[in-house]
Amino acid sequence: MDTHIAKIYGACNPDSPAKEEFYIDCSRARGNSIFVEQIKDHIVLANASMDDFSDSEDFKCFLFTGHSGCGKSSELKKLVRKLGQYSEDSRFYPIFIDANEYLDKFDVTITDILLAIATETSNILQKDEKIQLDGKFFAGVTEKLKSIFTDWEVEKMSVELPYGLPKFDIKRLAKDESAREKVRRVLKDDTYLLLQEINKLLTAAREVITNLESHGTSRNYQDIVIVLDNLEKIEKFDKGETGLDSARRLFLNYSNQLNSIKSHIIYTVPIDLMRSSHASVLGTLYDKSFVLPMVKVFKRDGVTEFSVGVDLMKKLLAKRLGELKLEEAFEDAAVDLLIKFSGGHIRTLLTFARESCTDAENLPISAANVNHAINSEYQNISPNFFPSYTWDVLAKLDLSSNKDVGVEPERCVEVLEKLLLFEYINGDDESVKDVNNRNQQIPWYAVNPIYRELDQFKRAKEKLLQESEKEQES
């Protein structure tokens, strides 16, 4: 086997957010919205207008969403890098928290989330040698937690305790149901206390990072920005039903707690919640929501190629290859297949590229190798397990002129969450000539190319066409 194939396989890991050297700005195929810049501008302006850092109402609380695998983590990582860079008008201290490291997605409470924020924030602040804070924070919380750990764990805590919260032991709660329940019982009535301690830590840290120049150690930071990624992956929150019901409980019922942290903060939320009937309520509870659509690789008719998006997907794949050129790694026909069946979904593109490596012996990887990868995906699909109405919903949307979920909103939201539908927004498109045409800014939807090939979808579409013809004849 060609040694380059193993390198391509490793580089196309779909679960690895894009590093700086892999990052591609796809905004021209995502509605011309550069999300990193939009979020940063809001934070810069909010900070510039603040008169009193102690006023929590001045801190921005944003929601960020998009399909699973569309590139949210890559965009957030880019935002973190951008925020930390010095510029004339801004430099922020970013704290990135991966919820997957702290939470069991099938069993989450608000206490778990606040503990994750407290623990990661305190650990990151202590790791930075330029930020020296004393150990008085979380003292009350720590004493309560110590009462539920074993003697060995208490001894371990005394060594690794940064500001009262041991990162190792708190992370362990994600995998230890018994320990989770103990912690929740102890802190059941202390959510307010935990929020107070988090905010005390943030206030003290802010005093340090905004006065670094006076100590001659570094340029000052303007403020702290917390990014909580993968929160949208929570399946069961506060004993609620799995899925959308739990998302509603968290982001609606506990919005006050999520908004009470005295820092600019960004939470990731499920796209089906953002596109549900609760979207308008979310707009009143949080400062602003940002939606990351798919990379548009075809136009609204679902047939005409959108060359801007196709070229961006090629560049994105080429970036992963390092010094190896795209044409050396993949045949042109293979690249075309990868992009066509990805539908502009980055994880699918990388998954198929990686899977095609397992069928290739030499470079360039052929269309036959990519077809092998695509066919292997169909082995994981059981169409008859989907509710029967699924295919009718998809067919109706596909045949509609505007490709809008208005055909059956609630069911469209359901299939959107399952990745049967992809969301797009027009951007750098010759067909969009009137910038004042507000309707052109509305998201539109297309059936995932993988599911377009299924007989169930084709039959449903043909049935609707026949029914339409009969109506016209009558």
Image (tube, rainbow, N blue to C red):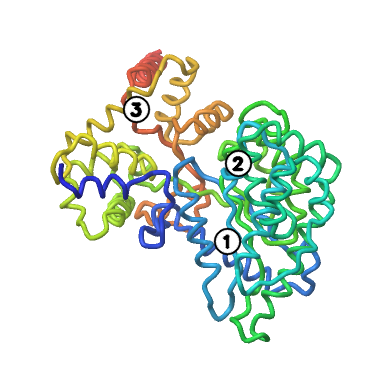
Compared with 257, 22 (above or below) is below
Question: What separation in Å lies between label 2 and label 3 (alpha carbons)?
Answer: 25 Å
Q: Quarter holding the N terminus?
A: top left
Q: Give the camera-side residue of 391 and 361.
A: 361
Q: Earlier in the sequence, mark 2 or mark 3?
A: 2
Compared with 283, 159 (above or below) is below
Question: What separation in Å lies between label 1 and label 2 (alpha carbons)?
Answer: 17 Å
Q: Earlier in the sequence, mark 1 or mark 3?
A: 1
Query: In the rendered image, which residue does mark 2 sit on?
Result: 274
Please say if the residues under marks 1 and 2 sit with CB atoms less than 8 Å apart: no
Identified by mark 3, the residue type is Arg
Q: Nearer the viewer, mark 1 or mark 3?
A: 1
Query: In the rendered image, which residue does mark 1 sit on?
Result: 39
Identified by mark 1, the residue type is Ile
Q: Could you tell me which secondary element the residue under label 1 belongs to?
A: helix
Question: What separation in Å lies between label 1 and label 3 (alpha carbons)?
Answer: 35 Å
Give the quadrant of residue 95: bottom right
Q: Residue at x 67, y 38 (%)?
A: 278
Q: Quarter holding the C terminus?
A: top left
Q: Residues within 10 Å of mark 2 (few under 14, many from 20)?
A: many
Q: Could you tell me which secondary element the residue under label 2 belongs to?
A: helix
Q: Residues within 10 Å of mark 1 (few under 14, many from 20)?
A: many
Q: Residue at x 48, y 55 (%)?
A: 75
Q: Give the camera-side residue of 336 and 257.
A: 257
Identified by mark 2, the residue type is Met
Q: Residue at x 73, y 60 (%)?
A: 163
Q: Could you tell me which secondary element the residue under label 3 belongs to?
A: helix
Give the quadrant of residue 399: top left
Query: In the rendered image, which residue does mark 3 sit on?
Result: 452
Q: Is residue 430 left or right of residue 151?
A: left
Q: Position of residue 469 (x, y in %)?
A: 36, 17
